[in-house]
Amino acid sequence: MLLVLGNGIAGATAARVARTLRSDAEVAMVSDEHPLPYSRTALMYVFMGRLRAQDTHLYDAAFWAKNRIDRIEGRAARLDANARTLHLADGRALGYERLVLATGSTPRRLDVPGSDADGVVHLYGLAHLDDIEAALPHANGHAVVVGGGLTGVELGEMLRSRGLAVTFLVREPRLMPRTLSSDESALAEATIRRHGVDVRTGASVVAVETVSGRAMGVVLASGETIPAGLVAVAVGVEPNVDLAREAGLAVRRGVVVSGTLETSATDVFAAGDCAEHASGRVDQLWYTARAMGATAGRGLAGQPTAYAPGVPFNAAAFFDAEWQTTGYAPGDIPDGWTERRWRDDAAGQAFRLVLDGDGRAAGVSSFGMRLRHAVCQDWVERSVTLGEVLAGLRRARFDPEFHRVRTDDIALALADL
Amino acid sequence: MTLSDRLALASGGVALATVGLAVAGVPMPPGLGLALVLGGFAAAALLVLPRYAAQPSAVALDGTMRASATARGGVAWAMALVLTAYYAATYWFPGRLDGLVRLFEPLSHALRGRDSDVWFVYGTFYTLAVAAMGVRALVKYRDHPYHRARTLAVMAVQTLLAWALPALLVRLQRPELYFSYTWPLDYDFLFPSNVQMLRDHGTLGLFALVWGVLLLAVVTPMLTYFYGKRWYCAWVCGCGGLAETAGDPYRHLADPSLRAWKIERWTIHSVLVLIVATTALVWLRATTGFGGAVSDALARFYGFGIGAVFSGVVGVGFYPLLGARVWCRFGCPMAAILGIQQRFFSRFRITVNGGACISCGNCTTYCEMGIDVRHYAQRGQNIVRASCVGCGACASVCPRGVLRLENGPGARMGERVGPGAFVPEDALDVLT
């Protein structure tokens, strides 16, 4: 049997890919979370009443049945890599030919006094929505979100949609400084503020105030106390590695994998949030989980393949403003590199092209506008010049028809530099 | 519930109560009654505007799955009951609506110079719904120029071409002509009786006949080739106009399952075959006198079963339960023709932006035609589907900018555009 532990996007993708390559084999996914793979990125929309839980399923039950991918509900208790057996908590033992660990991650707790109080919530899976729902009536109309990443922004949007006053505490001096340019941070912050969220940058939490075990607010390093009956914590996630560690697999922060995503155990692969590359890198994005799942799925089918995700990309939404990036365009660029920026505050739009030391395109990012992924990827793959990017900017338009597209303005502005 | 929500409910209640009193035969001054009915309904539609204006997010969908009116709750069932009852009365018990019809006398006389009737009442309600809910859509989609443009288009077509112009023609003692429809949606347009009627009406009748044929045989294939069926279904058609305005709150009620798609393909093409056969038989009878009983029965069945029950009672009456495009998706023979053209002879497609899909399901959920958009988007595959009316909702609700309606030359026909490893090329295909 080709077995996958975990049915998040990494696990589900691995199972699908294995099935495609091996029509004869038995393929199964084990999960104790939900019988049908769903999109974690859509959790916020369920909470906001835009989607029902079943709307977030990647495929319906008939898809998995038709493609003969068994869905086993159960909690993995122990992995015996030598005997190629996965033991479930209910006593079932699943023998496998090859195995993919896609066990995901767990939200990191806030390492301050009071962080385990009632009313302190996290966001990772469907069950967390119930936690947040249960905490709502005790919020007294005010919530605090701790953590300046994307999940924090999403929590802010979720809680605002229920009419709560939201204070968004960001430890860094600006939003997502490693990922966003300063222009993008500023526009994102403005967008979040426009939606009624009180954004506080440079704010670190030193304690959660509690009264008889229930959160009543947070105390900042500055000494200020912010009253809130609901404290949503989004300070990152930690790989779920207990099972692998107990089985004797090489584990550092995550399950250590080779270039083909094989773990230290024979015929056991790892993908997604739980995996750590040889370099020590742990990728915990939706897109990287999907890409790793596809590679692990090839390995699962007996065709180990080097993990080569190609030109990296990412996309996110800050309330109704979209951000996307292709290639290498970090918040602060390496020495010797340059960048060309365009920004329109009134329109809430920004565009940035990062050029490497030779003046060649290394990455693109944009805020408040939609760019065609294939075109941006092509620029980066071919390391084109500034001139070529500006000349081809029109081809990159992806905003809906009749939208006021700014590519000509951008080309003009950046060429003038 | 906000103050404006309460006022909206109260206005709708006043309008409904006035209709009820009129139907019950309670005498009232027609001018006042009409003002209460039309003003009440318009106010009910427009008083929700502050709610949209207060939300910076242009596509206000929060709470859709919880609200009674949009989540098949008691409010939705009550609305469906009122709507179906009204349709049933209009079609089969028009006498019951005499009191309501009388309220419309002042308007009918002012506009058409003749007495009101149930169909004038119906057309006026229909136009009011498109106009008032159109204004609501304009506010809701104020940051979305594509939606604004198509909303203005259907509002203009309905108000001018499908309401004011026919009324004016009646006033001028000419036949009541609707230039925005043709056969087979206007199913008896090509019946011998209608063709004869048009030919009896001189230049105007002849123009209407030629226009109807051109619309079907020349305009439709040309515009569908360049823009897809949306040029008609989301920009011109009255059924589409009502769906895109009054039906806008109900997009998510369309069933996106594979089973529904299979049923849809059978039913919509069956209706097309039925109207083609019926029209052919009616002509056979008219020219040879042969098969009178069969053609009469078929024509009667089509008028009752398809025209009244399917497109009217079910198509509109069930808006709050099944979504606004039931007729367009499962029945409309015009949509069937446009769909075949769109699937095989058109440049229109929904382009998927590389590997950026996060499989959230907003596109599939808010597709009013029940297309499982996500199925394609998460594979990085462009979407070419016969049923897509090009409303553009999927592109607007997508939180990652993954979808774009396009008709330029280029990738089409389900072509994969995913950027290599980020979208597994060997994704399984359950749909074939």
Image (tube, coloured by chain):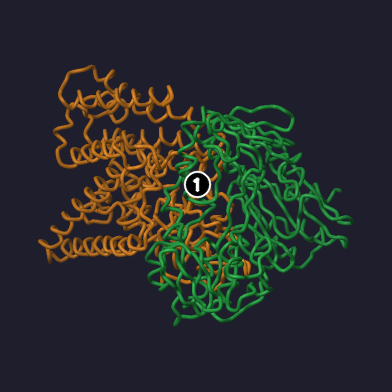
Whether residue A107 can be seen here: yes
Give above or below for A92 relative to B146: below
**Could you tell me the amino acid type at mark 1?**
His
| Parent chain of label 1 | A
Q: Is residue B119 left or right of residue A235?
A: left
Which chain: green?
A: A
Residue A366 coordinates in the image, percent (x, y) = 70, 50
Query: Image quadrant of residue B287?
Result: bottom left
Residue B100 coordinates in the image, percent (x, y) = 21, 28
Residue sitting at 28 percent across and 18 percent down? B32
> What color was chain B assigned in the picture?
orange
Whether residue B180 can be seen here: no
User: Which residue is denoted by mark 1 in the rendering?
Assistant: A128
Label 1 Cα crowd, 10 Å radius (few <14 / some 14-19 / many 20+): some
The one of B241 and A374 positioned closer to us in this rendering: A374
Q: Farthest right residue?
A: A336
Query: Image quadrant of residue B105?
Result: top left
Residue sitting at 14 percent across and 32 percent down? B96
Quadrant location of the N terminus of chain B? top left
